[in-house]
Image (cartoon, grey):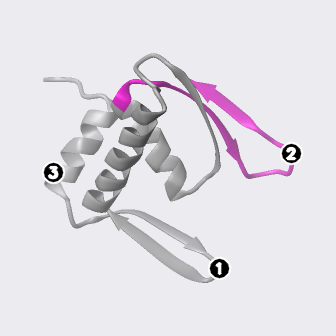
Amino acid sequence: MKSYNLTENFIASVKQFPEKIAIESFGQGVSNTLTYSELHEQVKTFAFYLGTLDIKKQDRVAIILDNSPQWAIAFFALSYIGAIRSDERRGGKEGRRRWSAD
């Protein structure tokens, strides 16, 4: 049995469930959704943009965002190009930061 990484699993989900909801976010009393195919298009667009900034495989890039669809888009876009993510997720208790690096 082949082992898949997170990006490969995401792409497989896009192919298998293109019209299913991948992300649902709530803010200011409004619910927004992205299907797997919509999320995939935004990820590819952002990955292309990162390439125009000369960000490439093995570059270290910090994602400093709240837990949001934009965080997921940045996460997968960096995975697409093979960059190394260093995340700072805001939220939770005031002043608390959680750092992680792959």
- Horizontally, residue 53 falls left or right of residue 1, namely right
Query: Which disc is residue 15 wearing?
Result: 3
- Horizontally, residue 102 falls left or right of residue 95, namely left
72 drawn magenta: no
Sooner in the amino-acid sequence: mark 1 or mark 2: 1
Q: In the image, residue 11 lies at what x, y percent?
A: 23, 43
Q: Residues within 10 Å of mark 2 (few under 14, many from 20)?
A: few
Q: Is 32 located above or below residue 48 in the figure?
A: below
In the rendered image, which residue does mark 1 sit on? 28
What amino acid is at disc 1? Answer: Gln
Q: Residue furthest right?
A: 95
**Residue 76: which quarter of the image?**
top left
Question: Which residue: 50% across, 19% down?
Answer: 59
In the rendered image, which residue does mark 2 sit on? 95
Q: Residues within 10 Å of mark 3 (few under 14, many from 20)?
A: few
Question: Which residue: 52% across, 54% down?
Answer: 70
Sooner in the amino-acid sequence: mark 3 or mark 2: 3
Q: Is 96 located above or below residue 59 in the figure?
A: below
- Horizontally, residue 85 falls left or right of residue 92, namely left
What amino acid is at disc 2? Answer: Gly
Q: In the image, residue 54 lies at what x, y percent?
A: 46, 26
Marks 1/2 in contact by CB < 8 Å: the verdict is: no
Question: Which residue: 20% across, 60% down?
Answer: 18
Sooner in the amino-acid sequence: mark 1 or mark 3: 3
Q: Is 9 located above or below residue 39 in the figure?
A: above
Query: Which region is colored magenta?
Result: 81-102
Q: Look at the numbered disc 2 and give the secondary structure of its residue.
A: loop
Marks 3/2 in contact by CB < 8 Å: the verdict is: no
Measure the C-alpha gap from mark 1 to mark 3: 32 Å
Q: In the image, residue 24 lies at what x, y percent?
A: 45, 67
Q: In the image, residue 5 lies at what x, y percent?
A: 31, 28
What amino acid is at disc 3? Answer: Lys
